[in-house]
Amino acid sequence: MIKNNIKKGNYLDILLRSDKTVFSTKEIALLWRESSSPAFRNRLNDYVKKGKLIRLRKGLYSKEKNYDKFELGVKVYNPSYISFETVLYKAGVIFQYYKKIFLASYLTRDIEVDNQKYSYHKIKDPVLTNKSGVQQKDNYSIASPERAFLDTVYLNKGYHFDNLSSIDWEKVFSILPVYNNKSMKKRVKKYQKNA
C-alpha cells in the first residue's frame, strides 16, 4: 500500500487537475492513494454534500455538471464502447437521430442517468474485447463507422442503412474476422453489393 502523503484540502485539487470528467470510486481511491475506508467514503460524501462533487450514480462521480456523457456511458458497465446508431448517425450512415446513446457491452440493458438514456447491447466477449476498429478518444472508447456498421449487422439481420457510401469496405473486411460468423459475412457482402 502506498503511503498517502496528500495534505488535507488537496484531495479535490487532484480530481480537478485530471482530464477525466467522470470518476469511479476505484479511480478516486487510486488518485488519492487510499483504500475504500470509512474515512475515504466520508470524504467523498462530504464533497457531494458541499456540492464540490456530483454523484451521478452509485460509485460514479463528476467534478462538474458538464461532464462527458460518452465517458459516463462506458464507465457504468465496463467493458463497453460507443457504437451502433450513435456512431452511424454521426458518420451519415443512418439519418434517424436518437437522443439515446448506444453502446456495445457484456450485457443488454437500458438505463437513464441525469436525464440521458443509455442503451447497452450484449456482444459476445471475444468480439467485445477485440479492439479492431475501436478507438480510444479522450476518456472513452468509440467504434469507427466500419466497426459500428459490423456491430449493427451482427445483432440485426435485416437492418436498413440509409447511406453506405462513407463506409470503407476494405476496413470492414479487415475487421469482419473478429465476429467469426459465416452468415454475417454473406450479409455484409450483400450490403456491399447494394451500396
Image (spheres, rainbow, N blue to C red):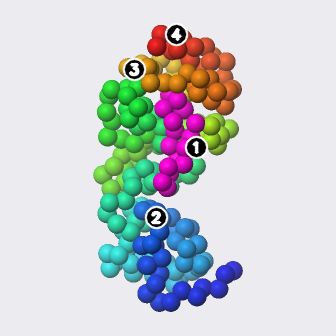
Dot 4 lies on which element?
A: helix
**What are the residue bounds of the magenta stretch?**
133-149
Q: What residue does disc 2 label?
A: 19
Instruction: Find residue 26 and report its horizontal and vertical position in percent.
Output: 56, 68
Q: What residue does disc 3 label?
A: 163
Instruction: Identify the image quadrant of residue 33.
Output: bottom right
Q: Earlier in the sequence, mark 2 or mark 4?
A: 2
Instruction: Identify the image quadrant of residue 34.
Output: bottom right
Q: Of the residues shown, which amino acid type is indicated by label 3?
A: Asn
Q: Of the residues shown, which amino acid type is indicated by label 1?
A: Tyr
Instruction: Identify the image quadrant of residue 57.
Output: bottom left
Q: What residue does disc 1 label?
A: 106
Dot 3 lies on which element?
A: loop
Q: Of the residues shown, which amino acid type is indicated by label 2?
A: Asp
**Residue 109 drawn above or below residue 167:** below
Discs 1, 4 touching: Cβ within 8 Å = no
Residues at marks 1 and 4, CA–CA distance in whole angstroms: 32 Å
Q: Earlier in the sequence, mark 3 or mark 4?
A: 3
Residue that appears at 33% across and 26% down: 95
Instruction: Find residue 152 and report its horizontal and vertical position in percent.
Output: 50, 28
Residues at marks 2 and 1, CA–CA distance in whole angstroms: 27 Å
Discs 3, 1 touching: Cβ within 8 Å = no
Instruction: Find residue 21 and report its horizontal and vertical position in percent.
Output: 42, 62
Nearest to the observer: residue 75 or residue 87: 87
Dot 2 lies on which element?
A: loop
Q: Earlier in the sequence, mark 3 or mark 1?
A: 1
Instruction: Find residue 113 and report its horizontal and vertical position in percent.
Output: 37, 54
Neighbourhood count class around disc 3 (C-alpha, 10 Å): few under 14, some 14–19, many 20 upward: some
Residues at marks 2 and 4, CA–CA distance in whole angstroms: 44 Å
Residue that appears at 50% across and 49% down: 137
On residue 193, the disc is 4
